[in-house]
Amino acid sequence: MSIKQRLEKILEGLPAGVKLVAVSKFHPAESIAEAYAAGQRIFGESRPQEMAAKQAILPADIEWSMIGHLQTNKVKLIAPFVSLIASVDSDRLIAEIEKQAARYQRTIDILLEVHVAQEQSKSGWSYDELQHYLASGALQQMEHVRVRGVMTIATNTDDEAVVRGDFQRIRDIFEELKPQFGEEFDTLSIGMSDDYPIALEYGSTMVRIGTAIFGAREY
Ligand SMILES: *Cc1c(COP(=O)(O)O)cnc(C)c1O
């Protein structure tokens, strides 16, 4: 199947209103251009240099989503154009995004990445750390950062019950945090190539799909 055909197949299965982030990390700009020609506009990348290099040569109306761990000293590479930083996992990172967004007179949308998976290795705030940060009031100082919701990566396992447990947990956290934010807190980003049909059952509003669109990545 071509990228276009795979994209169309996935889009058919998404309920109205669910956004598709086509995860193009490690794939060449030509593959993105192919998906773009098929109508896709939101692309996800995990490395800031790679995103910036692709952004420079691809159409300006692409919405770039940062989905990988972001070091504070790399925020400046993507701050001029990034649409969404979906992997925000520390107070220092938010402060830097605020600083860079202000510098470019922009507002940058972010998702709070929360760690709910069973693996230690997964990034993201623990629930307790996040609560602590939110209670600190630091977020209220950020005038150029708009918190749109939460994101997580479920446990990488064949045990569907574990994956469902992770999705239920992040869904609960999403619902719990919602009242603290405004209308704009509308994004629950869960679901990747292997687990997005399950994520949809738990109310995902934004799936992040790479392999099922572009094929296997070559590292
Ligand atoms: C790579 C990545 C994806 C896409 O994974 P696939 O299994 O290729 O669909 C989604 N979300 C994050 C955070 C990723 O790093």
Image (cartoon, grey):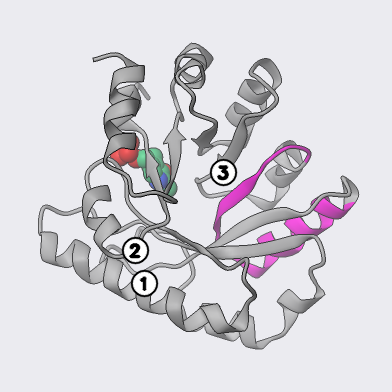
Disc 2 residue crowd, few under 14, some 14–19, many 20+, Cα 10 Å = some
Residue that numbered label 3 is attached to: 66
SS for callout 2? loop
Determine which of the numbered discs, if any, sits on residue 203 in the image: 2
For the C terminus, the image quarter is top left
Read off the residue under disc 1: 171
Residue at image position (49%, 11%) is 30
Between 111 and 17, the residue placed more toward the observer is: 17
- x and y percentages locating residue 172 in the rendered image: 37, 78
Relative image position of residue 130 (x, y in whole percent)? 54, 78
Please tell me whether residue 92 belongs to the stretch shown in magenta.
yes
Label 2 with label 1: CB-CB less than 8 Å: yes
Residue in front for this viewpoint, 140 or 48: 140
Residue found at x 55% / y 36%: 47
Magenta stretch, residue numbers = 80-102
Q: Based on the displayed image, in which of its 4 quarters is residue 20 positioned?
A: top left
Residue 216 visible somewhere in the drawing: no
What is the spatial separation of the Cα atoms under label 2 and label 1, in whole angstroms? 7 Å
